[in-house]
Structure formats: structure tokens, C-alpha cells
Amino acid sequence: MTYRAPVSDIVFTMRHVAGLDRAVADGVYGDLSVDLSQAILDEAGRFANDVIAPLNREGDKHGATIENGVVTTAPGWKEAYKAWSEAGWNALPGPVEYGGQGLPTLLNSACVEMWNAASMAFGIGPVLTMGAIEALVAHASDDLKSRYLEKLVSGEWTATMNLTEPQAGSDLAALRSRAERSGDGTYRITGQKIFITYGEHDLTDNIVHLVLARLPDAPAGTRGISLFLVPKFLPDGTRNDVRCHSLEHKLGIHASPTCTMIFGDNGGAVGWLVGEENRGLNCMFTMMNNARLAVGLQGVAIAERAYQQALAYAHERRQGRAIGTTEGMSPIVAHPDVQRNLLTMKALTAAARAICYMTAEAIDRAHLEQDPARRKTAHERASLLTPVAKAFSTDIGMEVASLGVQVHGGMGFVEETGAAQHLRDARIAPIYEGTNGIQAIDLVTRKLPLSGGETVRAQIAAMRAVVGRLLKESTPAFGATAPRLRDAIESLDRATSYLLHALASNAQGEALAGATPYLRLFALAQGGAALAEMALTANALGAGGDKDPAHAGRIALCRFFAENIAVGAKGLEETVMGGAGFLQDATLALAS
Amino acid sequence: MTYRAPVSDIVFTMRHVAGLDRAVADGVYGDLSVDLSQAILDEAGRFANDVIAPLNREGDKHGATIENGVVTTAPGWKEAYKAWSEAGWNALPGPVEYGGQGLPTLLNSACVEMWNAASMAFGIGPVLTMGAIEALVAHASDDLKSRYLEKLVSGEWTATMNLTEPQAGSDLAALRSRAERSGDGTYRITGQKIFITYGEHDLTDNIVHLVLARLPDAPAGTRGISLFLVPKFLPDGTRNDVRCHSLEHKLGIHASPTCTMIFGDNGGAVGWLVGEENRGLNCMFTMMNNARLAVGLQGVAIAERAYQQALAYAHERRQGRAIGTTEGMSPIVAHPDVQRNLLTMKALTAAARAICYMTAEAIDRAHLEQDPARRKTAHERASLLTPVAKAFSTDIGMEVASLGVQVHGGMGFVEETGAAQHLRDARIAPIYEGTNGIQAIDLVTRKLPLSGGETVRAQIAAMRAVVGRLLKESTPAFGATAPRLRDAIESLDRATSYLLHALASNAQGEALAGATPYLRLFALAQGGAALAEMALTANALGAGGDKDPAHAGRIALCRFFAENIAVGAKGLEETVMGGAGFLQDATLALAS
């Protein structure tokens, strides 16, 4: 079983939840039409299916290898990357002035989903290059831009993010790598960085490292960190003083080399400042925010792939006799409990996809709207949604991949089947680019207070508007969607008020204690509202004569989510609002 | 970080929830005292810590290997098994007349937890031997008993369960292996069996296979299956016609050889009938029920191990600054979100342990009570609890192991850390010995109707009694335990009535659709009640002057479970009672 890019679901989500049609009509996307978007995604889907997906299992088995500091990617990897970048996929979101196609984040997000579903170990590399491009566009000098952007946009070179050090993971204040001014405008970088994705590889002739380091006179903490561009090969063609020391032996994404990088063995790697001295974290945030959305898309991607594989197996595998049949074994997809597993997988995936694409559209409007006030609103909406997109999607990526193993029964535990690989691959996404706990804390402590709470209030109002439309809907297939979803949104509303109040009254412990369940609650309400929006559109299209059977499926999926998943909202609300009791006695409970 | 058997938690759970003290007082356990139990468990804990646990990582790396049909276990495995069985641990629950110590299932369950926490790949082997012993004791002829039981009880030989065939997993009716009568009272067995745990190995001189097969004149379906004993070496020392064809390449428990077994390459393996012809499934159920509890204990075990490792890491790893501290980085255990993860891990583990031990005690009473009516009541309670013990414990095994990876951050994804191995190992337990979906269906369709629903009603009444005691409790540390737990139990009660009604009105689809969320709901209410029982005892002991700080921890843990986990009950109730809407349109939703 390989991957078939779900282009029609993707396009439907882009158009009818993320607002592609509306954005096109508003002129936000310039010349881009819905038809052109569809054509691009069809083509991307074919590339993902035909070129990348077949590499996934081999990549897992071979992994990337290192010998004398030289990293070799898995068989076929180099050719696939070359074909992929030459087909222009890396350049898709890149700025036009550097050879990019300047297409929206929304469109690229759909592509990122497909690359990562085809192979997460393949897809993660370009995520970092694209992030670096954004950071350089926003902060680099014209000289650096002209030297590096074109080749990064085309994908002829790749880029990395060098943040983590052994003592500095979630807490970048502890960062120790050093940068010294050399006197000629460049800097000499020394230090060790760990967990550097595609830090070294054989896919391209050069690798551009973006590295966080401290100047000798920098203040302590995060305000003393600067960002440097450190190429593997210097402009004169000589090798820079940076090397890969070792690769991690990881649970999953084996084909993606995770490197320990050593800078400055021989006096210091030559680096160029990006942005201003001591303002490096700011620059890094530019690339981190979009990387967070991309990691969320990895969660969607692995969930989609696991779902497809489980569904195919459930159609093929016969065991037991389904209700209403009289002889022979039924395909297990006919058993209610298996249906529940598959529908849970599909509904969670669809909800996470919708949230990620909504986030992408908000990012686009934050850049492309003419009106500054609309840009600000969109920027705050993107800021609010980004941690939800990252954490929820990657959490459900694991849940769905685990259910996928379960649907396979004993075969799921056998590596050759491939279901287990998805579970192994999925496990990194809730961790990297800021753990999901960090995302939840970001959501509660930094995003809820945006515009005095108005940003989150507006988002909840939009969810309520969907319920308003549902309440007017009399199609029986919606079942109890409206009341279940309304309850979930009201739970979210109350939990939001509670947390805003806790923050305002300096009850930081309560806010932090409730952060993770709050993020899940937000996602259940938002995801349910998004699926309902799609279902309402599907229903209207069906009523208008569109015979696509997918429409009835969208209503059924929305109903399943509301009646079986969104009903968890009330318990999460109680956890947020009454669950902080553990703060008092946690030490006792964890000691005994 | 290695494993430290949590003997005091184990003993507290046995005594104050599972009812060890009561059973001893009632005379159910003969000479066994609480002190002796404690002494045995202390010793078992030392063995698990010192001898088995150190093998776990090496076993994962080396795995078991096969060459020309000969299976070699990982380095150290053979010596450890020999030391373990010679120390009498295999014989602990075995019948006295065959050299066993005749100790209760409850005591052995605590040991099984410890062996499996030390190394799940090690612990699973004896589970099968012990199951086979029970089946032989219950069903085998005296001749077979005298030939095999003594060496199986001592552990000099091991045993296997040969059920699964490629086309017959959850559905044993599809079984095809054949048995022909040879005329001398023995049978000739031919066929292929897959997923046979420890089907071949080098730990012992002989291996006793219990094999399900069909006689030529057997009726179709499950009523035509017989059970045979097929030894690797025949009584005269010659090799039987059975061999291991290959080992599975698995996600986890690498050191446990999972074999494809071929019976009858050369005319048929010699086998002896166990029990009556065509009644083999009955005999197999004897061993399967206890194996189900043992697999539940594996879930508890891996959860405990993952928790211990995550807790140790959280004390050691410093990142960020906790609320109320002013300089330097805090250990991450001081951060509320990490505390939530760790408390969730610990609370789920403790609840699952309590449910498993309660099940074990019910199994003991079902065998050991004098009064037949009490035996029947206990047997039905054990029957009711077994699927919950198996499925809930193994589900939370995965959840806890995954949280354990998360607490480690990036290090959790690196294999050397060991957290990832727990996740990989844990993944099989929800699948084998009947998938958790099968367990849920068993609970709803076969266990709820026991004694016309009285068995489950009595269990719910016992949970309510705990809430009654909680309501009289004024210690502030209990927080909202009483109302939260009461709500969960009332949700369980309503969902139970709904399902009993659905079964009575032949709405089988609704019952099957709700099975999995119902099992979870049952476990939340039962687990919460069990933790509350422990907390009430801890509180009383504390009030009585017992200064053990673990008592306050038990109250805090119970509160955390009630306020943060049991609150999921309402959503599960709604899912059970209103979530079956998907039955109508599942095909549409899964097709689109």
C-alpha cells in the first residue's frame, strides 16, 4: 500500500474552510485562480505519489549513514531531491525576485502535507530551507540575499536551523555557542549544536547553516543571542570550519540525517550576521513560526498516510461475520468497532488539516492584505492558530498512526507492513520545533491575551456562527452535530474566560496547569466547526444537484466528529478550570 | 536509568484495593500471610531489578536470531532465564502436586508486573508457560499431566500457545491446521501457525506446544477445533515434526522470538489430545483468560517503567525557570505542564494496576472460595473485569510510554535513551491475546449480561460505596474527588443501562458501536474508585499517626485522577449513547 494524495479533500478544505475562494475574490492572491491552484495540486499529488512515496520504506530501512564526517542519504534520495527541486517545488512559495513563484503559504501548505505524507523524512528537509528563506528575506543584508537566496529558493542549496545545544533545548537562554567579530565584517563561530536536521548530506553542493550564537559582549539570556549565516562552503569555494560529528540513532524518520554539528574546530567557522546583533531570536522566530505550521502539516500528513493504509487493509482483511451477513468472513471494515477506529482516524485528520490550512490562510493575509488593520487582525489570528495547528495536528498524528497499527492487528507490529513506521516517524513531530507543551503555554500565555482577548473572542464568534448555520439545517444526516458542537464551543468560551482571568490576576500556575487540555479543547471546537463548515457546503452543493458522493461522506464525518470526539470538550473544560489542584501537592504525588 | 520495582505501591494496592488482607482474613489464601507476601515481593523486586532489568536494552539491540531453524536468544538471556526458574519464580503459582508453590494469582500478578517491567520481552515467555499449565491442569489426561506438568511448573521446559494462522487471527473459526488420528491414541498435526511467541528458542531443552487443529470429521467453525499437546522433543528423545520457519521483524519486544511454526513437514507432528475432541476452544479459553490478565499487567509494567524513567529525567534535566524561582534553570519536574504529564502517567498506571490486581483476586476467589455461590460470584466478577484489565491497561501502557518519550524532549526520540523502546515494546499489548476491540466487544456482549446484569450492577454499587465514604471525608486535600468520581460512576451506570437495553432489544450494532468507549468509561470509573479507596485508607493511616509521606501522595494522585482524568467520563457516556449514528453512513464517510 502506497500513498495517494487526497487532492480533492485538500482542495475542498482549502476552498470551503480555509477560504481560498474568498481570498481569491478579495484579490489577496493576485492572479492566482482556484483552477490554477487545483492544477498545481494535482501535479504535486502526482509527484508525491509517484516519485517520493516509493522511497519511504527503503529510506526507513537504510537510513542516512556517516563515514569520516561524510553523510550519505538513502538510495534514490539524491535523485528524488534533484527531480523535486528541478520541477520547481522548492521554489513554489519563494519570492519572485529570487526566482521563486511567489505562491501563497496556503497552496504551499497543501504541498508540504503531500511531500511529508509521501515521506516525512524527505519532507522535513525543505521545511527548513523554506524557513531559512523567510528569515533571510526578512532580516538579511542585501549582500547576503544576493549571494544566497537564489540558490536556496531553487533548492540548489539547502538550509538548516542551528538552535539546540545539549544544555539549551526549550530554553534558548542557556545557549553557549560563541561568535567573535573578525574585524572584516565577518564573525568566527564556535560551538556544538545538536539535533540538526539535514545538517550534513549529499543532496546538494552546499548547505547554508543559520546559527544562533553569542557575541563576547552580549547580555545574558535570550537578549544576547545573534543569528549568523554559516555556509558549508565559503564563497571562494573553500570548506568552512564546520563539520558533522555524528548522526543520531532515532526511533523514526531514519532517512533524515539528524546531526551533531561542530563549529570552529580550527579557529572558528566564518559567519555573516543576519539582522542586528543580539536580535537573533527575533529573526529565528520568523522562521520558527512557519516551521511550526509545517510540523503541524507533518502531523496531518502522517495521519493521512496511516489512515489510507489502515483503510486499505480493512477492506482487504477478512475476519468474522458482520451483522446482517450470513456466511463467509466479512472484510473487517464492516465491523462497527473497526469503523469507529477508521472514522476516528479520518475525522481527526480532516479536523487537523482544516486548522492547519486556516492558519496558512491567516499567514497569507497577514502578509498580503493591503489594509494594515486587516494585516494586523490576520497576523494575530495566525499567531493564535499556529500553536494549535502545531500541537493538535502532531498529537493526532501519533494517535492516528497508533490506531493504524491497531487496525492491522498482529500485522501492524511487523515492520514489513509499514504501519509501524508511520508510528515511529510520527513520534518526533510533537517534540521538535517547540514541544507541544511549549505550544500550549505559548497559546495560553502569549496568544490568548492578544488585543486584550479580542483575537480569541473573534475566533470563538466565528465558530458560533457555524453553529448558527447548523441550527437552521434540517437534514437528518447531521444528527446531533449542532448541539454537540455548540456545547464544545461554549466549553471553550468558558475555559477561555477562566484563563484570561487567571492571567489577569497573575495566577500563572493555574494558567500553565491548564494549558495542554485547553489547547486540545480549542482544537476540538475549532476542528468541529471547520468540519461542520465543510459539511454545510457539501450539503448545499448536494442540494444544488452536485452528485459527488463525497458530499454525503463529509456530512457523516462531521457528525461523527461532533458526536464522538467533540463530546470530550466538557471534560477538558473541567480539567482546565478545576484541574489545577495538583499544583499544591504534585511534589508529594510524584515522590511517593 | 534502570527499573526499581515499586514494591511498596504494589503491596499497598494488593492490600487496600485488591483485598489481600480481607482474603487472608477470610481464609481464602490458606497459610499465606501479608508479611510473607511482602517478603516474597521484596525478593521478586530484587530479582527483577538486579538480574532482568539490566538485560532489557541489550535484548532490544540484539534481538533473537534464527539460523537454519535454530533460534538464539540475546546475550545473557539464557543465564537469566535459568537463574529465574531455578529461584522458583516460574513455580510460584504452579500446583503443589507438580512441584509448584501454589501461591495465589494475586501474588503472581504482582510478580508478572515486575518481570515485565524489568523486560517485557523476557516476561512474556513465562506468561505462556503459566497459561499452558493451567490448561493442562484443567483439561489434560493424567498421563499427560504426569509427563509434562512437573517440568513446565519448574520452568525446565517452556510452553507456547499455537492459535493464529494467516487467515485466522481474531476469527478462530477460520482455522485450518489439521489433526489425524494415528490409531495409537496419538494424533498427527499438520499446518502453519504464525505469531508464536517463544515458539522456538535456546532457553530450555524442550518446548511444549499447545496447538489448535481440526480433526478430519470435525464440524465447521469454532465447534470443530481440538487442542493438542505437541512437544518439540518426543518422550523417546527424538525430534518431533515441528520447526520454526522464520522470526518476525517487529516494532518492539525484539528479544522475544515471534515464530512462524511449521507442523508436519514430514508426515505430521505427533500430538496428544488435551480435553475432548472438538472442545479445544474451551480448553484454550482457560489459558487465554489468564493470559489476558497477564497482558494487562504488561501494560501496567511498561507504564511503570516509562514513568520511572521520565520522572528520573525530569529531575535531572534543567530548562527554564519555574514560577517562584529567581535564578538558574529549574529541573523540568518543577514546571506545571511537565507535572501534568508525569501525574497523568502515574495516575493511569496506578489505576490500571488496581484494576488488574482486583481481577487477580477475583480469579483467586473463583478457584478458592468454599461456597459455590461465592465462587460463581467471584468468577463472574473476574470475567467482567478481565477485558477491562487487558484493554485499559494496555491502552494506557501506550499512552504512558508515549508521554514518557514526550517528557524527554528530543532525547526521547534517540534510541540510546531507552524511552523509545518502551513505546515500541508497549505497542503489541493492545493487539495480542485478543485485540482491545475484541476485549470491548467481549465486555459488552458477553460480560454485561452475566446474571442478567447483576454482576455489573454489583460492581457499580461497590464503586458508589466508595463515593459514599468520600462524601463523608472532609480532608481538603481530596479537592473535588467525590463529585467528579460520582459523576463518572453515574455516567457508567447510565451507559450500562443503555447497552443492556440495546442488547435486550437486539440492537447489536449500537452495542458494538459503543463497546470501545464503554470499556474506557468503565475503567475510568473503576480506576477512580480504586484510587479513592487507596487514598481513603492512606488518609486514615495518616490520621492514625502513620508518618509515611506516601500517604499524602496517594491522596494527591487520587485527586488528580478524579479532577483531570475521570472527567472524561461524561463525553464517553455521550459517545456510547449517542455516537452510533455513524453506523448508517460509515461506508459513505470512509469512501469519500
Image (cartoon, coloured by chain):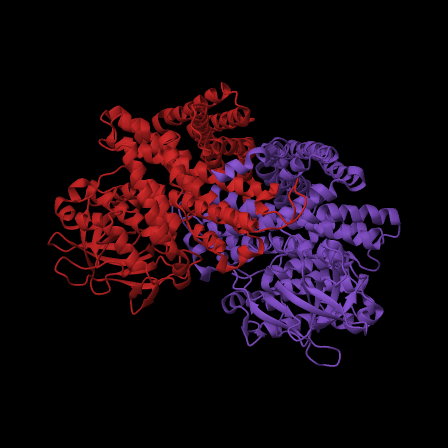
Chain colours: A red, B purple
Between B230 and B340, the one lying in front of the other is B230
Task: Establish if A27 lies above or below B364.
Answer: above
Q: Position of residue B562 (x, y in %)?
A: 62, 37
Task: Establish if B419 lies above or below B270.
Answer: above
Q: Position of residue A332 (x, y in %)?
A: 59, 47
A481 left or right of A446 in image: right
Q: Give the residue drawn at x 54%, y 27%.
A: A477
Between A317 and A201, the one lying in front of the other is A317
Task: Establish if B9 lies above or below B246.
Answer: above
Which residue is most to the left?
Answer: A184
Q: Give the residue drawn at x 64%, y 43%.
A: A322
Between A99 and A266, the one lying in front of the other is A99
Res. A159 visible in picture: yes
Res. A108 visible in picture: no
Which residue is most to the right?
Answer: B371
Q: Position of residue B417 (x, y in %)?
A: 46, 60
Q: Position of residue B59 (x, y in %)?
A: 54, 67
The image shows a total of numbered marks equal to: 0
B58 left or right of A177 in image: right
Task: Establish if B44 lies above or below A461.
Answer: below
B475 left or right of A554 in image: right
